[in-house]
Image (spheres, grey):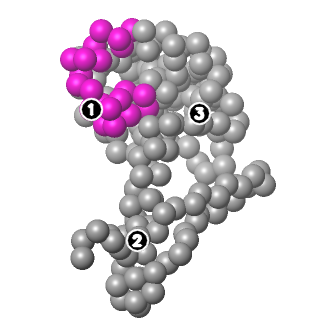
Amino acid sequence: MGTSREETESTPAGTEPRWKAAGEPYLLTRDELLAELREWVPGVTERQLRSWASYGLLPPTTRNVPVGANDGVARALYPVWIIGLVRDLWKTIRWKQRTIEELKPIAPILWKQWATREHVFVSDRVTREPDPILEERLSSAIQQAVADYTEYLAKTTGHLVTHAQLELHQEDATSRTIAFRPYAPDQTSH
């Protein structure tokens, strides 16, 4: 009996993914790509990948039996750098409110940029580049949450919060403190 698709493409805990163990060129099946994207781009679906490919946002795939697959079934294979490309497309569409039509002309340029950065997704400890757009959105959301919470405290306890800060401590022993403006009642509306 042959190996099922799930057996071919799943990775037992603590082992390298098939695509990584197979060596260069690093090629992922669609299921492997989606598994990797779950960490990088939560929410992206197979349907979106197919849609973006049909609109020309993703490079053409090669169709072959993946190295290490025992079932002999040819599948669409993606270069590993497509993880970064999909992440960038997702952010651009979602956060910058760009349409697929706006992205079509620049897609080949993005392909070339990501093809030269393949190493980012192959190293043992993947380091993500800072994302200023996401950082700004998160910062704004935290600022609003702090303002809402301090307003709630002021109204329920009768005491204003004088200052608020968030301390972030990372595993590499670096830390960061972010100060927030707490709720202050509007002095002009009396």
Q: Quadrant of the N terminus?
A: top left
Left or right: where 119 falls relative to 92: right
**Amino acid on which the number 3 mark rests in the picture:** Glu
| Disc number placed over residue 168 in the picture, else none | none
Front tag of 3 and 2: 2
Question: Mark 2 packing: few (<14 Cα in 10 Å), some, or many (20+)?
Answer: few
Residue 52, image x, y percentages: 28, 23
* Circle 3 residue: 129
Nearer-N-terminus badge (3/2): 3
Q: Is residue 65 above or below residue 15?
A: above
Q: In percent of the image, x 41 and y 70: which residue is there?
A: 183
Q: Can residue 144 be seen in the rendering of this structure?
A: yes
Q: Secondary structure at mark 2?
A: loop
Image x and y of residue 47, in percent: 25, 34
Residue farthest along the right direction in this orientation: 173
**84 or 137: which is nearer to us?**
137
Looking at the rendered image, the disc whose residue lies closer to the viewer, 2 or 1, is 2
99 drawn magenta: yes
Residue linked to disc 1: 97
In this rendered view, identify the residue nearer to me: 137 or 41: 137
Between the C-alphas of marks 3 and 2, the distance is 36 Å
Residue tagged 2: 184
Region of the chain picked out in magenta, as a range: 87-108
Which amino acid type corresponds to the residue marked 2 in the rendered image? Ala
Residue drawn at 23 percent across, 25 percent down? 99
Residue positioned 36% across, 79% down in the render: 152
Residue at image location 69% in from the left, 31% down from the top: 123
- Specify the quadrant of the image occupied by residue 33: top left
- Of mark 3 and mark 1, the one earlier in the sequence is 1
